[in-house]
C-alpha cells in the first residue's frame, strides 16, 4: 500500500536520515528495555525528541484498522477476521499467502523463540490466506479489543480449546476452525501438511452474520516524523530474526527473515507502513509446559517506526476491550501513519536499531 499524500514527508525523512548517519558505517546497538507488567506501569527509555505536533488533514471516513480513506460506496459493515498463520520455518514461509493484505499483524512468540502471526483482516478480505496454524492462549488477549472478530485457527490442545470456547461465550470472539470441519478451510496440493491449509477470509463472515465493524485500536494522526528522529529500521531477535528496512520508494518497511526478503507465494514482499516494537512480558502458559503467553494488557516501553523515523514511548492498555495508547515521555499521543501495521510483541532487550550499512546490506 502506497501513501501518496506522504511523499513530501518521505523526502524529508531521507534527507534527515542521511544527515544523522552520513559517513558512519558502524552498527548502532540500541535496544528496548524494561519488561511490562499487568499491574504497574514501567517507564519507557527516554530520548530527546521534538514536541512539535501537526494536525492530520481531514480526509473523511476511514477504515478503522488502517486509517486509510474509506470506500464509501462499499463500506466494510462487517466483523474483522483474525487468522493464525505459521512462521515456523522456511517451508512455512514458502507457503505464505495473503499476509500482505492484512490490516494489522501481531507477531507473537509461541515456544521459546519461535513466532507465529495473528493477522487481522477487515478492509480487504482475501479468498486464500495461509498456511493456517493453531490457536494459543495469548490470542484471547490479543484479539479482545477487535469487537468480537471471527478467529480462524487449526489445531489446539484441550486447554486452549477451552479458553477459546469461554472467550466466545464471553462475546470476545467467534471461533472458526478446520477442527470443526468448517467449509471455509481447504487443503492445497502445492505443499504437504501442516503447511497446506488455507482459508477463505471473505467466506468466514458467514460465521458472524450479525458482526459489527471493529473500532480503531491505534491512533492514526501520523505524527511520528514530527515527534521522532530519522531511522534506517530495526531488527527483532527470534529463532529467525526479523528486520524491517525503511524504503522510501516503497513507502514502507521491507521485512526480511534472516537475510532473505519475506515474500508471499505471489512474490510480494511484506512492506508495512508502520512497525510497532511493543515490549511485553512472556510468562509460561498455564495450559502446557512448552508454550509462553504474551501479556498485552498493562503498559510498557514501545518504539514506533513510520516514514523513516522512530519515536520511543510507552504503550498502555488497561482492559481487554481497550485500544492501545502510545505516548511520548512528554505525554504527546503518538499517531501511526495510515496503512498496514506490524506489531512485534518482543521481550525486553531483543530489538536493535539498524545502521545505514546494515540496512543497505539487506536490500
Image (spheres, helix red, strand yellow):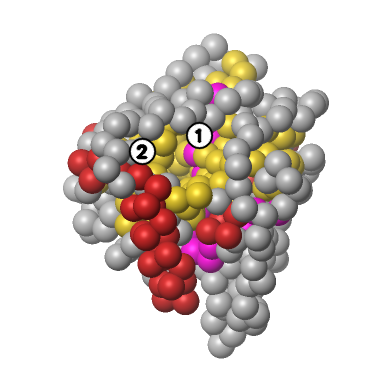
Where residue 163 appears, as percent x and y from the top left, is 67, 31
Question: Residue at coordinates 62% horizontally, 19% vertically from top-left?
Answer: 283
Residue 138's spot in the image, x, y percent?
Answer: 60, 32
Q: Is mark 1 on a helix, strand or loop?
A: strand
View extreme (bottom): residue = 73
Q: Distance between the residues labelled 1 and 2?
A: 21 Å
What residue is shown with label 2? 354
Determine the secondary structure under disc 2.
loop
The numbered mark, 1 or 2, whose residue comes first in the sequence reads 1
**Quadrant position of residue 39:** top right
Residue at left 62%, top 32%?
A: 45
In this orientation, which residue lies closer to the viewer: 354 or 148? 354
Q: Nearer the viewer, residue 94 or 156?
A: 94
Of residues 254 and 146, which is closer to you in this image?
254
Residue where numbered disc 1 is placed = 108
Q: Is residue 316 above or below residue 223?
A: above
Q: Residue furthest top?
A: 289
Q: Where is residue 325 in the image (x, y as percent from the top left)?
A: 71, 49
**Which label number is shown at residue 150?**
none
Amino acid at each position: 500500500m502506497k501513501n501518496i499524500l506522504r511523499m513530501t514527508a518521505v523526502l524529508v525523512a531521507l534527507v534527515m536520515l542521511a544527515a544523522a548517519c552520513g559517513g558512519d558505517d558502524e552498527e548502532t546497538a540500541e535496544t528496548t528495555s524494561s519488561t511490562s507488567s499487568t499491574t504497574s506501569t514501567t517507564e519507557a527509555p527516554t530520548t530527546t525528541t521534538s514536541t512539535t505536533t501537526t494536525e492530520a488533514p481531514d480526509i473523511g471516513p476511514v477504515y478503522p484498522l488502517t486509517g486509510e480513506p474509506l470506500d464509501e460506496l462499499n463500506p466494510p459493515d462487517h466483523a474483522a477476521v483474525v487468522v493464525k498463520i505459521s512462521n515456523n520455518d522456511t517451508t512455512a514461509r514458502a507457503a505464505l499467502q495473503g499476509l500482505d493484505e492484512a490490516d494489522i499483524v501481531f507477531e507473537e512468540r509461541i515456544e521459546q523463540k519461535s513466532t507465529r502471526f495473528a493477522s487481522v483482516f477487515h478492509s480487504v478480505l482475501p479468498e486464500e490466506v495461509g498456511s493456517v496454524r493453531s490457536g494459543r492462549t495469548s490470542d484471547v488477549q490479543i484479539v479482545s479489543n477487535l469487537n468480537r472478530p471471527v478467529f480462524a485457527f487449526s489445531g489446539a490442545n484441550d486447554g486452549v480449546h477451552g479458553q477459546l470456547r469461554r472467550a466466545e461465550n464471553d462475546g470476545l470472539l467467534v471461533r472458526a476452525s478446520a477442527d470443526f470441519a468448517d467449509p471455509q478451510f481447504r487443503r492445497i496440493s502445492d505443499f504437504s501438511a501442516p503447511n497446506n491449509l488455507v482459508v477463505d477470509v471473505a467466506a468466514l463472515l458467514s460465521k458472524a452474520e450479525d458482526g459489527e465493524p471493529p473500532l480503531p485500536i491505534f491512533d492514526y494522526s501520523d505524527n511520528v516524523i514530527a515527534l521522532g528522529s530519522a531511522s534506517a529500521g530495526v531488527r527483532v531477535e527470534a529463532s529467525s530474526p526479523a528486520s524491517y528496512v525503511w524504503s522510501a520508494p516503497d513507502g514502507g518497511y521491507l521485512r526480511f527473515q534472516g537475510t532473505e526478503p519475506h515474500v508471499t507465494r505471489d512474490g510480494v514482499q511484506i512492506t508495512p507502513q508502520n512497525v510497532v516494537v511493543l515490549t511485553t512480558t512472556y510468562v509460561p502458559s498455564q495450559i502446557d509446559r512448552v508454550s509462553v503467553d504474551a501479556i498485552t494488557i498493562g503498559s510498557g516501553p514501545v518504539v514506533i517506526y513510520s516514514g523513516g523515523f522512530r519515536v520511543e514511548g510507552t504503550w498502555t492498555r488497561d482492559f481487554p476491550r481497550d485500544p492501545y495508547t502510545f505516548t511520548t515521555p512528554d505525554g504527546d499521543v503518538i499517531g501511526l501513519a495510515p496503512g498496514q501495521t506490524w506489531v512485534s510483541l518482543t521481550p525486553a532487550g531483543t530489538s536493535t536499531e539498524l545502521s545505514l550499512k546494515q540496512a543497505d546490506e539487506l536490500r
